[in-house]
Amino acid sequence: MRPLNARIDPQAGWSGARTPLFASRMTRRLAGFVATASNLRLPSFGAVAFAVVGGAVVCGITVGGHTGAVLDGIGQPLGFSIDKVSVHGNSETSEIDVLQALWQTGSQTLLSLDPTEARETLEAMPWIDRASVSKIFPDRVTIDLDEHRPYAIWQTDKSFYVVNREGKKIVPYVPGRFDALPVVVGDGAAGAAAGIVDEMEGFPEFRARVRAYVRVGSRRWDIELKNGVVIRLPEDKPLEAVAQVVRMDRENTLLERDIAMVDMRLSDRVVVRLTEDSLSRRKQRLEERAKLIKRLGKDKPV
């Protein structure tokens, strides 16, 4: 690797011939600088001592992490102490939590307050998406917040989280005020939820019957209804399949029948699977029918 202070000579092929000339010029320049410096008045011992001691103090304060304390010590007598804090845009985050986050920066005056550090501290809080911090001299701080908007409840394994539209986890889900949010299940479901949940607004009655949207293989969705029926959607054009199911239900009350699953993944057919109870009853009816046919065959005269 070439040293950082190495000079790159574009005419390296003949640089050796110019070395004596270059050295001669540099010698003359150095001699001139020495002559000029010899005519300058040297600073007094007190000025030099002040500069050295002052530099050492500043270096010690900076390296030791005491800059904020020093600025606070200067700012407080001058009236720059943080006295008023205005918070705007918070609904899920309490003002007390915002103030505590601000005090965690350690700043007591506007002189030591770093708006960037304060913003990063606030944006690390669960509900806060974006924050801006402004200093208004002599003693006021204004904080404007944009909070995450809860969009869905995401189940991953046995854990539940409230997530925003982009799938970012906000807080763990606790039954209560967010129960009306749609539930999405599986790996990748949170980030892909908007793709199906938004489109389901076109089917409001059907959407009200949905219990959960289950992500399958990061490719497609199953829809689990509140009555237990599962609708398997295709990877391509899933909303067309939903429209077809809604139409069949409207014409034949499909989803009110004793079925367990409607498979819409095949483009040329719809596969319906009965529940276990329905299969058992159907098997029993078929057996009774076979017995009846057999008995009628015996009773028929020859």
Image (spheres, rainbow, N blue to C red):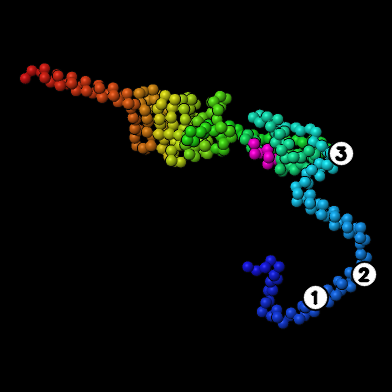
The amino acid beneath tag 3 is Pro
| Prevailing secondary structure class for the magenta stretch in the rendered image | helix
Which comes sooner in the sequence, label 3 or label 2?
2
Q: Residue furthest left?
A: 302
Label 1's element? helix
Q: Residues within 10 Å of mark 1 (few under 14, many from 20)?
A: few
Q: Is residue 120 visible?
A: yes
Q: Residues within 10 Å of mark 3 (few under 14, many from 20)?
A: few
Distance (Cα) linking label 3 and label 2: 45 Å
Residue at (70, 71) in percent of width and height:
7
Instruction: Name the image quarter holding the N terminus.
Output: bottom right
The image position of residue 297, as x and y in percent, is 12, 21
Label 3's element? loop
The amino acid beneath tag 2 is Asn
Q: Which mark is residue 26?
A: 1
Magenta stretch in the rendered image? 119-125
Callout count = 3
Residue at (37, 25) in percent of width and height:
254
The image position of residue 171, as x and y in percent, is 58, 33
Q: Nearer the viewer, residue 21 or 83?
A: 83
Rendering quarter of residue 97: top right
Q: Nearer the viewer, residue 233 or 282?
A: 282
Q: Which residue is tagged 3?
A: 77
Q: Which mark is residue 39?
A: 2
